[in-house]
Image (cartoon, helix red, strand yellow):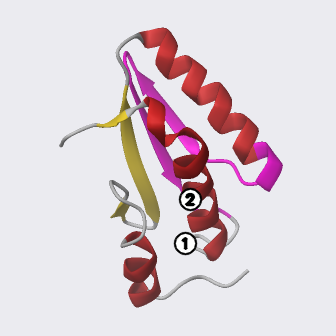
Amino acid sequence: MTRLTPEQVEEKLAGLPGWKREDDFISKAFKFRRFMDGIAFVEKVALVAEKLGHHPDIHVVWTTVTLKIQTHDEGGLTRLDFRLAAEIEKKLGKGARTKKA
């Protein structure tokens, strides 16, 4: 799989509200009302990720779940990273608020 250029990354990010670039990752923080809502979200993300065979870094702090995505084998961002982010948004984005920085 080929790494994306910085221009391609910015173009793809434009279609993913709330996602941002952090070095060689894309990330988004999701905020939930209760801790267990966040844990349920993590479980659903895991199912989506497993279907694509591509797994995000997941960080849980109380009611906030932060996802960081990168193609580790490539050491950077590829189309697969944006496909996973888009699937997460499409299937799971409604139950959470994007955490304001």
Q: Amino acid at mark 2?
A: Ala
Q: Is residue 60 magenta?
A: yes
Q: Give neighbour class at mark 2: few <14, some 14-19, many 20+ (Cα, 10 Å).
A: some
Q: Secondary structure beneath disc 2?
A: helix
| Position in image of residue 56 (x %, y %) | 60, 47
For marks 2 and 1, the one nearer the N-term is: 1
Q: From the image, which quarter does the N terminus lie in?
A: bottom right
Residue under pointer 2: 86
Q: Is residue 26 magenta?
A: no
Disc 2 versus disc 1: nearer the observer: 2
- Which segment is the magenta one? 50-72
Residue that mark 1 sits on? 77
Mark 1, secondary structure of its residue: loop
Mark 1 residue crowding within 10 angstroms, few (<14) / some (14–19) / many (20+): many
Which of these two is toward me, 32 or 59? 32
Q: Is 51 located above or below residue 79 in the figure?
A: above
Q: Nearer the viewer, residue 2 or 17?
A: 17
Residue shown at 37% from the left, 66% from the top = 23
Look at the picture and state if 32 lies above or below 87: above
At x 59%, y 70%, the residue is 75
Q: Residue at x 37, y 79 (%)?
A: 10
Residue 12: percent from left, percent from top: 46, 76
Q: Quadrant of the C terminus?
A: top left
